[in-house]
Image (spheres, rainbow, N blue to C red):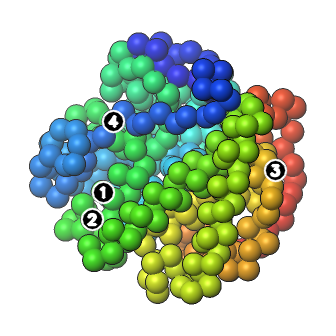
């Protein structure tokens, strides 16, 4: 766990002393957009045209934010258009690495050993956390984006005219509804589990954990009326929720102390999670070995022994 300071790697845990024990996530710094014609997107600069084999995706199976992009790469059939590297599950003194291991796909593109080197290739003076996902432009040797919520929007539509599969998970007519769902779920649940797990005071932990379960209760009620979050069709909001739910009983319930209830204890949520998991291609994006081993063995501040539990055994098929 660490960060870069003016291009130099520093092994340092998150600072919660200055925030009274609260974990505050920093915003992503690379916010360019791939567009169909290379025009400027919502943020950043232009020049990133949707092209076959121009872009490369760096991810971790363990990370829920990176998992979103793996899912959309699969849903849209972009495996043949966007190449992939997957880091090792263990994050130690050098952060994410490409050390050999089950499920690791090395960085054959830039030949790096450590993920932070991708950031320094893009910007030798970069300062900030070294995170996944990273969407890399092979043509200009630049990071297009390291913001997962925007990468999945690019994958959703930017490549539609050059071979992506059909499917729109952010339909124009319900975008306001999706945005509203995303906003609440991100603040209290997607990010809320981290606010619980990384809290270093009782007050900070309790301030996060109760809203988290209020949101789970709210979603449980919503799913008693709808098959998916917005109705009968799966949208971006469902997949953004999925990557947190699939990790919940395995790591967040115990490791992050989100232990008022399990997803298994929610009738509608557990059935919903199982249905999403069973969609074609989704199970291939889920690696529980990477997920459990990363959280329990990497986050020494939370689990000093680094012992990884053998359970729970959860059946999604």
Q: Are marks 2 and 3 in contact (CB under 8 Å)?
A: no
Labels 3 and 4 touching (C-beta < 8 A): no
Q: Find residue 85 and report its horizontal and vertical position in percent.
A: 48, 44
The numbered dot on residue 254 is 3
**Residue at the location (86% across, 57% down)?**
311
Q: Looking at the picture, how far across and down is residue 262, in whole percent?
A: 78, 64
Residue under the point 64% across and 42% down = 195
* Distance from Cα at disc 2 to Cα at disc 3: 37 Å
Distance between mark 3 and mark 4 Cα atoms: 33 Å
Residue at 66% across / 62% down in the picture? 214
Mark 4 to mark 1: distance in Å? 14 Å
Mark 2 lies on residue:
157
The Cα–Cα distance between marks 4 and 2, rounded to whole angstroms, is: 20 Å
Please give the label number shown on residue 154. Answer: 1
Q: Nearer the viewer, mark 3 or mark 4?
A: 3
> Which mark is first along the chain, 4 or 3?
4
Q: Is residue 308 left or right of residue 181?
A: right
Rendered position, 159 above or below 117: below
Q: Nearer the viewer, residue 104 or 123?
A: 123
Q: Secondary structure at mark 2?
A: helix
Residue wearing tag 4: 30
Is 147 placed above or below 178 here? above
Q: Residue at x 19, y 54 (%)?
A: 35
Dot 3 or dot 1: first in sequence order is 1
Q: Nearer the viewer, residue 310 or 222?
A: 222
């Amino acid at each position: 766990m660490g960060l870069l300071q003016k291009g130099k790697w520093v092994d340092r845990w998150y600072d919660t002393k200055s925030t009274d024990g609260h974990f505050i996530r920093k915003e992503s710094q690379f916010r360019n957009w791939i567009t169909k014609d290379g025009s400027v997107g919502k943020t950043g600069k232009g020049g990133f045209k949707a092209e076959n084999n121009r872009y490369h995706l760096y991810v971790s199976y363990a990370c829920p934010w990176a998992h979103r992009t793996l899912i959309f790469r699969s849903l849209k059939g972009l495996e043949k258009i966007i190449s992939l590297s997957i880091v090792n599950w263990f994050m130690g003194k050098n952060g994410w690495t490409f050390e050999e291991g089950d499920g690791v796909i090395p960085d054959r593109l830039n030949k790096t050993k450590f993920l932070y080197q991708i950031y320094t290739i893009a910007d030798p003076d970069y300062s900030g956390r070294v995170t996944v996902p990273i969407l890399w432009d092979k043509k200009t040797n630049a990071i297009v984006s390291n913001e997962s919520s925007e990468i999945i929007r690019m994958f959703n539509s930017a490549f539609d005219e050059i071979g992506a599969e059909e499917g729109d998970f952010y339909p124009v007519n319900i975008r306001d509804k999706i945005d509203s769902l995303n906003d609440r779920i991100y603040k209290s649940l997607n990010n809320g589990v981290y606010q619980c797990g990384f809290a270093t005071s009782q007050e900070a932990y309790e301030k996060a954990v109760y809203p988290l379960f209020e949101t789970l209760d709210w979603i449980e009620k919503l799913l008693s009326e709808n098959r998916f979050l917005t109705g009968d069709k799966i949208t971006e909001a469902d997949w953004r929720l999925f990557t947190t739910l699939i990790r919940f009983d395995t790591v967040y319930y115990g490791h992050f102390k989100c232990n008022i209830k399990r997803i298994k204890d929610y009738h509608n949520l557990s059935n919903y999670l199982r249905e999403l998991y069973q969609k074609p291609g989704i199970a291939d994006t889920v690696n529980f070995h990477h997920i459990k081993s990363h959280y329990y063995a990497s986050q020494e501040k939370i689990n000093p022994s680094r012992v990884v539990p053998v359970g729970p055994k959860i059946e999604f098929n």
